[in-house]
Image: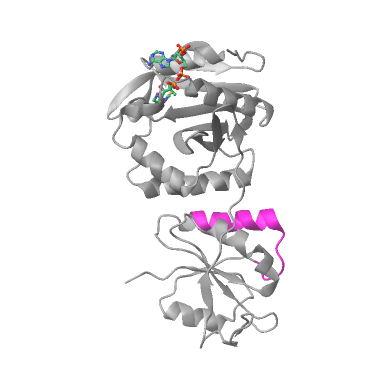
């Protein structure tokens, strides 16, 4: 039996008796002041919806958006922010402008909410991710198809031996990651920027990389990166991470870019040194991987230190 989705109810939109009836019917009801029935000023409200969606995360439920006609222009944005991933799209319910119990559906039957609730999956309008272009690569958020291909290129490979991440357990892990990445780009510069690395010639996703600003000071941050093993040693690492660092320095106004590397990961160290990163020392027992404490090499790069060619 499929579980009912929580209904996000802004105060004053639905009469208490309707909410009670829904709750009595097994419909989880989340009472929230975050979704106003009036036209919504975009960012703050969307972020509030995001916060509600985050709070519901992990419950395997998809939110229901209750919309007044005034909210309709924002329905697609709201649906994006309320949905946690593509497999849990938000549904929307629209109410009439003047009577909380009346539903309005353009060109369709009207009826009291108790008798004939109208709802349907909300069409999603995904925000545009940032895209960085190099000679052979695009750094962007891959399409679901590209991400599925990437899953098959990396699962079960040695790519994770030198990463904290042990890899995705399914394609949907990566699709959730894609969703979070799109949200983060929409939220702005204080959030992690996660890019898929796309080979232009084939259209395949061959890797991923991130700029992760520190919450306390977004001008400082660290980078992470990995390429599917089949694409190593073709200069793609240098090309992609060089472009990521340039972007962080110029677009995110980074004043210090850090990178930490498991001691012994010569490929990663070589890449960083080729880009101009300076070695700062060893942080002992800094991380744990597969039950073992590991030392890390620490690197950093300041504006003006970037090496090319
Ligand atoms: C690290 C990684 C991204 C390098 O990508 P890549 O595309 O193979 O690197 P490039 O071809 O651009 O090489 C750049 C430089 O890195 C160094 N390098 C790359 N692979 C190397 C290897 N196997 N051994 C030693 N140095 C190596 C070299 O200095 C190279 O410069 P060169 O070609 O002039 O000799 C890739 O090995 C990888 O994804 N590894 C698995 C995940 C990982 O370790 N991520 C980093 C975690 S900190």
Residue closest to the eye, 100 or 175: 175
Judged from this view, the residue extending furthest toward the front is: 201
Q: In the figure, residue 287 lies in which quadrant?
A: top left
Q: Is residue 15 magenta?
A: no
Q: Relative to 219, say whether 277 is above or below.
A: above
In this rendering, position of residue 263 left or right of residue 48? left
In this rendering, position of residue 140 left or right of residue 174? right
- Residue 185 x, y percent position in the rendering: 60, 43
| Residue at the (54%, 23%) spot, across then down | 239
| Residue at the (53%, 42%) spot, across then down | 141
Q: In the figure, residue 149 lies in which quadrant?
A: top left
Q: Quadrant of the N terminus?
A: bottom left
Q: Quadrant of the C terminus?
A: top right
Q: Which residues are magenta?
A: 36-54
| Residue at the (37%, 34%) spot, across then down | 165
Tally of numbered discs? 0
Asked whether residue 297 is in view, the answer is no
- Residue 82 x, y percent position in the rendering: 54, 59
- Residue 296 x, y percent position in the rendering: 41, 18
Give the quarter the ligand 1 occupies.
top left
Main SS of the magenta part reads: helix
- Residue 187 x, y percent position in the rendering: 62, 46
Q: Relative to 28, say whether 117 is above or below.
A: below
| Residue at the (55%, 54%) spot, across then down | 51
Colour scheme employed for the rendering of this structure: one colour
Q: Is residue 44 magenta?
A: yes
Asked whether residue 204 is in view, the answer is yes
């Amino acid at each position: 039996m499929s579980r009912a989705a929580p209904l996000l109810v802004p105060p004053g939109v639905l009469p208490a008796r309707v909410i009670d009836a829904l709750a009595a019917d097994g419909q989880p009801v989340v009472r929230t002041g975050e979704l106003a029935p009036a036209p919504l000023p975009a960012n703050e409200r969307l972020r509030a919806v995001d916060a509600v969606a985050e709070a519901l995360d992990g419950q395997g439920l998809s939110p229901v958006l209750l919309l007044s006609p005034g909210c309709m222009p924002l329905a697609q944005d709201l649906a994006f922010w309320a949905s946690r991933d593509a497999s849990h799209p938000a549904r929307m319910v629209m109410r009439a402008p003047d009577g909380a119990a009346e539903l309005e559906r353009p060109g369709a039957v009207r009826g009291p909410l108790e008798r004939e609730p109208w709802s349907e999956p909300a069409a999603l309008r995904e925000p545009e991710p940032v895209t960085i272009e190099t000679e052979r690569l695009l750094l962007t958020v891959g399409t679901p198809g590209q991400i599925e291909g990437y899953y098959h290129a990396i699962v079960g490979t040695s790519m994770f031996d030198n990463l904290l991440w042990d890899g995705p357990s399914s394609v949907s892990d990566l699709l959730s990651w894609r969703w979070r990445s799109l949200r983060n780009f929409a939220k702005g510069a204080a959030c992690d920027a996660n890019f898929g690395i796309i080979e232009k010639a084939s259209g395949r996703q061959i890797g991923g990389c991130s700029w992760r600003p520190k919450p306390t000071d977004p001008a400082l941050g660290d980078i992470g990166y990995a390429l599917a093993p089949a694409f190593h040693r073709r200069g793609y690492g240098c090309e992609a991470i060089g472009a990521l660092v340039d972007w962080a320095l110029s677009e995110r106004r980074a004043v210090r870019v850090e990178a930490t590397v498991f001691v012994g990961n010569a490929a990663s160290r070589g890449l960083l040194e080729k880009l101009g990163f300076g070695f700062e020392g060893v942080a002992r027992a800094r991380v744990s991987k597969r039950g073992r404490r590991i030392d890390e090499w620490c690197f950093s790069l300041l504006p003006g230190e970037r090496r090319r060619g």
